[in-house]
């Protein structure tokens, strides 16, 4: 199960408050915390809490930021795919991000299947991996014998009340707010918030969304400056009028033939390294 939370600032007290939220949201007991070496996690407050509640607390090795167990694997697969890499700061941005996480947790935990590594064997330099069949986190919980039947009934009731397409539509809307907050530095005002797209219209757009490329608002590429300047000297600057005359007199001649003439005309200036450049120029 994946639970993402937006903390407004680094604080050990806030970390404990959010850990309690995670404990209440999980359908099974929280048994361990695998943290990095940030002081928000590695402090006496968190340590005393873990010791009092019997939760195992681990940390990553020094200068090994991807060393903690079961944590970094979700940073790319879920967090960055949802939020992108824009900078978010302030309480308004925290609330905007929290609204996205509130919707996405239902979609990810109830409808998003994932693979789990079953076994891994090494034969010399070759590594063979075997995976279980892809299942959603909900299906894994329902198949677990350690989860009480009352909890499973609640999860099934919650699952039947959810619409994955409606959740996906709400996620896109929340991502649009996050992208606006990342660009402007402040969340969009209520008067600036665009009207929500009707679900039927959203479903129709899914069939052609692939034609426009990436559809997540948090992953839209910024418009770059057109590259109109030369980064190196033009090797055909002085001989291009001659090349144009050859092309006008012999329209069917290939760029390779033109290059052979240039090499014969000025072997000290031209070599095979300029052939591809000449082909592009002739094609243009």
Image (cartoon, rainbow, N blue to C red):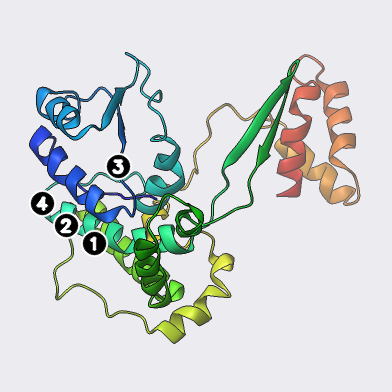
Can residue 8 be seen here? The reply is: no
Q: Nearer the viewer, mark 4 or mark 1?
A: 1
Kindly identify the residue that appears in the image at 18 percent across and 65 percent down: 188
How far apart marks 1 and 2 lie (CA) works out to 6 Å
How far apart marks 3 and 4 lie (CA) works out to 28 Å
Q: Is residue 34 above or below residue 2?
A: above
Q: Nearer the viewer, mark 3 or mark 1?
A: 3
Kindly identify the residue that appears in the image at 83 percent across and 46 percent down: 247
Q: Secondary structure at mark 2?
A: helix
Q: Are marks 3 and 1 in contact (CB under 8 Å)?
A: no
Q: Which mark is residue 99?
A: 1
Q: Are marks 4 and 2 in contact (CB under 8 Å)?
A: yes
* Circle 2 Cα neighbour tier, 10 Å, few/some/many (<14 / 14–19 / ≥20): some
How far apart marks 3 and 2 lie (CA) works out to 25 Å
| Residue corresponding to mark 3 | 30
Q: Secondary structure at mark 1?
A: helix
* Circle 1 Cα neighbour tier, 10 Å, few/some/many (<14 / 14–19 / ≥20): some
> From the viewer's perspective, is 47 left or right of 237?
left
How far apart marks 4 and 1 lie (CA) works out to 12 Å
Q: Which mark is residue 91?
A: 4
Q: Which mark is residue 95?
A: 2
Can residue 72 be seen here? The reply is: yes
Q: Position of residue 221 (x, y in %)?
A: 42, 52
**Counting residues from the N terminus, which is met first, the one under dot 3 or under dot 2?**
3
**Counting residues from the N terminus, which is met first, the one under dot 3 or under dot 1?**
3
**Counting residues from the N terminus, which is met first, the one under dot 3 or under dot 4?**
3
């Amino acid at each position: 199960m994946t639970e993402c939370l937006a903390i407004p600032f680094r604080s050990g007290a806030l970390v404990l408050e959010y850990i309690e939220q995670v404990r209440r949201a999980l359908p099974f007991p929280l048994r361990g915390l695998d943290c990095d070496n940030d002081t928000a996690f590695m402090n006496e407050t968190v340590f005393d809490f873990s010791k009092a509640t019997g939760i195992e607390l681990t940390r990553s090795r020094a200068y090994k930021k991807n060393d903690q167990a079961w944590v970094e694997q979700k940073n790319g697969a879920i967090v960055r795919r949802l939020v992108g890499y824009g900078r978010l700061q302030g309480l308004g941005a925290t609330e905007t991000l929290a609204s996205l996480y509130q919707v996405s947790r239902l979609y990810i935990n109830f409808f998003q299947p994932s693979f789990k590594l079953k076994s891994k064997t090494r034969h010399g330099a070759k590594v063979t991996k075997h995976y279980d069949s892809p299942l959603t986190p909900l299906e894994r919980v329902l198949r677990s014998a350690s989860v009480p039947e009352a909890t499973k009934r609640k999860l099934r009731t919650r699952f039947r009340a959810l619409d994955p397409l409606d959740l996906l539509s709400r996620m896109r809307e929340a991502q649009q707010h996050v992208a606006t907050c990342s660009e402007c530095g402040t969340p969009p005002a209520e008067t600036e918030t665009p009207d929500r797209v009707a679900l039927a219209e959203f479903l129709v757009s899914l069939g052609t969304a692939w034609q426009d490329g990436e559809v997540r608002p948090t992953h839209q590429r910024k418009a770059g400056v057109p590259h109109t300047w030369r980064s190196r000297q033009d090797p055909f600057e002085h001989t291009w009028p001659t090349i144009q005359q050859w092309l006008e007199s012999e329209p069917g001649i290939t760029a390779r033939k033109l290059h052979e003439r240039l090499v014969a005309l000025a072997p000290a200036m031209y070599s095979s390294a300029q052939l591809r450049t000449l082909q592009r120029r002739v094609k243009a």
